[in-house]
Structures are given as structure tokens and as C-alpha cells.
Amino acid sequence: MWKDEIVEEVCKHREAYSSQFNYDLDAIVADIKEKEKPHQDRLVSREAEKPSTDKNPVSSTK
């Protein structure tokens, strides 16, 4: 089977990073958020899209 060196390297780093937090997703997310703090100017804030309240989303043009 063909091996992709880049994918293998990414997996290796992901494994090493995750193991630092005992594979605890909440701890990993908290660490990432801490690392983002100094770079707020580089982050995109996207507000959640609100679902349409229109019962008939197809508008008629009569």
C-alpha cells in the first residue's frame, strides 16, 4: 500500500499532541483556545446562522 509521508507526519504530531492531554478533547480545546489568545486579530468570528422561520421557503411571484 502506498504511504503518504506528509499524512504520516501529521498523524505522528497529532498523536504526540493528543497524548500530552491524555487524549482529553476538552483539555486539547482549552489549550488551543489559550494559544489563540495572542492572535485575536488573525481569527474570524462567525455568528451562527439562524434558521428560516418561513414555513414555505419557496416564495411565490404572483
Image (cartoon, grey):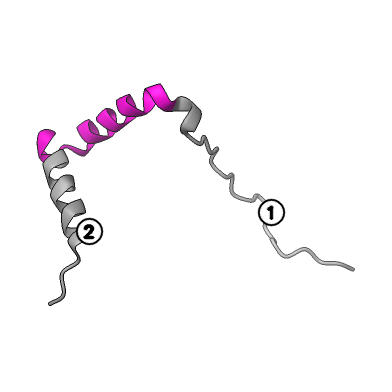
The vertical placement of 17 against 58, above or below, is: above
On the rendered structure, is 55 left or right of 8? Answer: right
Q: Does 18 lie within the magenta span?
A: no
On the rendered structure, is 56 left or right of 22? Answer: right
Prevailing secondary structure of the magenta residues: helix
Q: Which mark is residue 54?
A: 1
Name the residue at 53% across, 41% down: 48
Residue 36: horizontal and vertical position, in percent?
A: 37, 28
Quadrant of the image for the N terminus?
Answer: bottom left
Q: Find residue 62 and report its image quarter.
A: bottom right
Residue toward you, 33 or 56: 33
* SS for callout 2: helix
On the rendered structure, is 2 left or right of 52? Answer: left
Residue 6: horizontal and vertical position, in percent?
A: 22, 58
Dot 1 or dot 2: first in sequence order is: 2
Residue 23: horizontal and vertical position, in percent?
A: 13, 40
Q: Are marks 1 and 2 in contact (CB under 8 Å)?
A: no
Q: Which mark is residue 30?
A: none
Residue sitting farthest toward the right: 62
Residue sitting farthest toward the top: 38
* SS for callout 1: loop
Residue assigned mark 2: 6
Q: Type of residue at label 2?
A: Ile
Q: Type of residue at label 1?
A: Asp
Residue toward you, 49 or 20: 20
Q: Which range of residues does the magenta coloring cover? A: 19-39
Is label 1 or label 2 in front? Answer: 2
Name the residue at 55% across, 37% down: 47
